[in-house]
């Protein structure tokens, strides 16, 4: 009897648990394998039939979606572990990936680009899409967190939203005046009472749907999140606060936003102001 796609993933998670993987790792691998399975099914393929070329194409697909090399590498790690489970490690051998130079500047929007983006979004006249862009750009939440938002997570009276996390300790983010306004406009006409962002069929929007919506504005969720963090750092907000707002588990991730924005003249000015010549 042919094993169902879901059964294969379920067996994989059991195998991971027997291998001593943490609960968080098991959840992450299960989530990424499910996404990969959905992508394969659109091509008429299954996880057990996947080839090395299929893995390579998926990596190219992820890169085309704007996923960072770090994120793509983690996803490939999940697929690589799965390939060991099905005893076909050769399918992840020789996979090519884009590399990143940690010294290069993080890709984000500048002030002019932000203004252009917001102008285009508002001209479209879609309250839901406007609220999506403002929420991503003014709160820095991940696209997965945006999709999971419930109306009960948003307190318009107090002007804040809460992001539910796997640790059980929600992350509270204050809403800007504009983000609050456009969320309020959107929710006032929402056809449902639970999810914040839904499709025309009143179903919760998926990450892929959000990416599709943003694509017509020539932007992706990762760039908006990067822009949120970079703008805070550029305004002098402390790394600790930015890290807390962004939900970074490792503060070194946040420190990347401070690396290349220090202009040479600022360095010189710092020295001249500190070490004043004796009179």
Image (cartoon, rainbow, N blue to C red):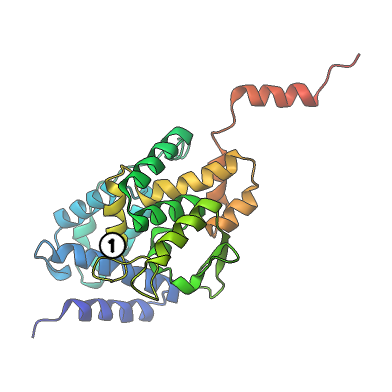
Left or right of 62, for residue 248 = right
Q: In the displayed structure, does residue 226 sit left or right of residue 33?
A: right
Report helix, strand or loop for mark 1. helix
Task: Tell me if I can see residue 155 in this picture.
Answer: yes
Farthest top residue?
Answer: 279
Q: Nearer the viewer, residue 192 or 205?
A: 192
Of residue 259 and residue 186, the one placed in the foreground of this image is 186
User: Going 56% across and 63% down the picture, which residue do you hit?
Assistant: 160
In this rendering, the answer to whether 58 lies above or below 110 is: below
Residue drawn at x 36%, y 65% as measured from the top left? 197
Camera-nearest residue between 215 and 177: 177
Q: Where the C terminus falls, by quadrant?
A: top right
Q: Residues within 10 Å of mark 1 (few under 14, many from 20)?
A: some
Inspect this view and state whether residue 165 appears.
no
**x and y percentages locating residue 151 in the rendered image:** 45, 71
Where 23 sits versus 200, above or below? below
Q: Indicate the position of residue 266 as horizontal and vertical percent values.
A: 65, 26
Q: Is residue 114 left or right of residue 236?
A: left
* Vertical relation: 154 (above or below) 226: below
Q: 131 and 273: which one is in front?
A: 131
- Which quarter of the figure has residue 209? bottom left
Image coordinates of residue 92 in percent, x first then y, are 23, 57
In the rendered image, which residue does mark 1 sit on?
A: 80
* Quarter the N terminus occupies: bottom left
Mark count: 1
Residue 118 x/y as whole percent: 41, 43
Q: Residue furthest bottom?
A: 1
* Residue ID at (55%, 70%): 170
């Amino acid at each position: 009897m042919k094993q169902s796609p879901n059964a294969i993933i379920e067996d994989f998670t059991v195998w991971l648990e027997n291998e001593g993987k943490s609960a968080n790792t098991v959840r992450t691998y299960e989530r990424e394998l499910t996404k990969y399975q959905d992508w394969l099914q659109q091509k008429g393929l299954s996880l057990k039939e996947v080839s090395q070329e299929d893995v390579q194409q998926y990596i190219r697909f992820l890169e085309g979606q704007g996923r960072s090399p770090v994120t793509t590498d983690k996803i490939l790690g999940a697929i690589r572990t799965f390939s060991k489970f099905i005893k076909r490690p050769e399918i992840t051998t020789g996979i090519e990936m884009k590399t990143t130079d940690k010294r290069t500047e993080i890709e984000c929007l500048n002030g002019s680009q932000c203004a252009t983006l917001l102008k285009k979004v508002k001209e479209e006249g879609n309250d839901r899409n406007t609220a999506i862009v403002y929420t991503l750009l003014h709160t820095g939440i991940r696209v997965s967190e945006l999709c999971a938002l419930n109306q009960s997570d948003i307190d318009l009276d107090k002007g804040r939203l809460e992001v539910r996390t796997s640790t059980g300790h929600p992350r509270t983010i204050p809403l800007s005046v504009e983000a609050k306004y456009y969320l309020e406009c959107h929710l006032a006409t929402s056809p449902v009472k639970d999810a914040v962002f839904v499709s025309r069929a009143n179903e919760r929007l998926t990450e892929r749907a959000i990416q599709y919506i943003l694509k017509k504005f020539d932007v992706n969720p990762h760039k908006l999140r990067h822009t949120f963090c970079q703008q805070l750092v550029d305004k002098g907000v402390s790394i600790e606060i930015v890290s807390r707002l962004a939900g970074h588990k490792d503060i070194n991730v946040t420190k990347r936003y401070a690396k290349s924005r220090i202009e040479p003249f600022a360095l010189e000015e710092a020295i001249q102001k500190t070490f004043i010549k004796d009179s």
